[in-house]
Amino acid sequence: MALGTLKAIHTLIWFSVESCVVYLLWSGVAGRSDRRAAVAAAVVAGESLVFLANGASCPLTELAVPLGGGKAPVTNIYLPKWLAHNLPAIHVPLIVAAVLLHARNRRGRAS
C-alpha cells in the first residue's frame, strides 16, 4: 500500500468519526438522544478505545512509518499539521460536552 492511499483511508476514517462527534453535539443540543446518537456514540467510543488501547497513538501510524510517513503522531492524515497534532486535545472536551448534553437529555426524560 502506498503512503498516499493510507493517508486517504485514514482521512476518511477521521472524517467519519468527526461527523459522529458533530452529530452527537448537535443532537445533544437539540435534545435528541435517540438511536442515531447511540450509533454515533458507539463509533466515537470504539475509535477512542482503539486509540487508548494503542497507547494514545493511532494504530495506522505504525503502518505509515515503513511507508515513509515519519514517526510523529497522526502524520498519516490529510489535515493541517497543527490540527492533526492537536486532535486529542480538541476531541476530549468535545466528547465530554457530548456526554454531558446527552446525560442532561436522559435525565430530562426520566423526570
Image (cartoon, helix red, strand yellow):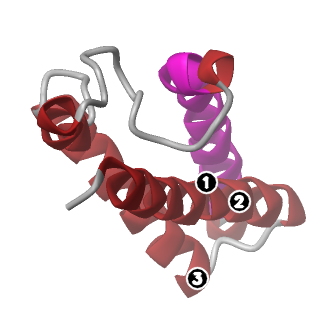
Q: Residue at 25% of width from left, 26% of height from top? A: 57
Do callouts 3 and 1 mark residues in contact (Cβ within 8 Å)? no
Q: Residue at 61% of width from left, 21% of height from top? A: 81
Give, as a three-letter code, the residue at label 1. Glu
Given residues 110 and 74, the one toward you in this image is 74
Give, as a three-letter code, the residue at label 2. Asn
Give, as a three-letter code, the residue at label 3. Arg
Query: Which span is picked out in magenta?
Result: 84-106
Q: What's the CA distance linking mark 3 and mark 1? A: 15 Å
Can residue 107 be seen in this snapshot? no
Badge 2 or badge 3: first in the primary sequence: 3
Q: Quadrant of the N terminus?
A: bottom left
Q: What's the CA distance linking mark 1 and mark 2? A: 21 Å
- The quarter holding residue 64 reads top left
Tell me the residue that label 1 is attached to.
18
Q: Give the percent coordinates (x, y) of residue 101.
A: 71, 47
Viewer-nearest of discs 3 and 1: 1
Q: Give the percent coordinates (x, y) of residue 96.
A: 57, 33
Instruction: Specify few, some or many for label 2: CA neighbours under 10 Å numbering under 14, 14-19, or 20 or more.
Output: some
Tell me the residue that label 2 is attached to.
105
Secondary structure mainly formed by the magenta segment: helix
Instruction: Specify few, some or many for label 3: CA neighbours under 10 Å numbering under 14, 14-19, or 20 or more.
Output: some
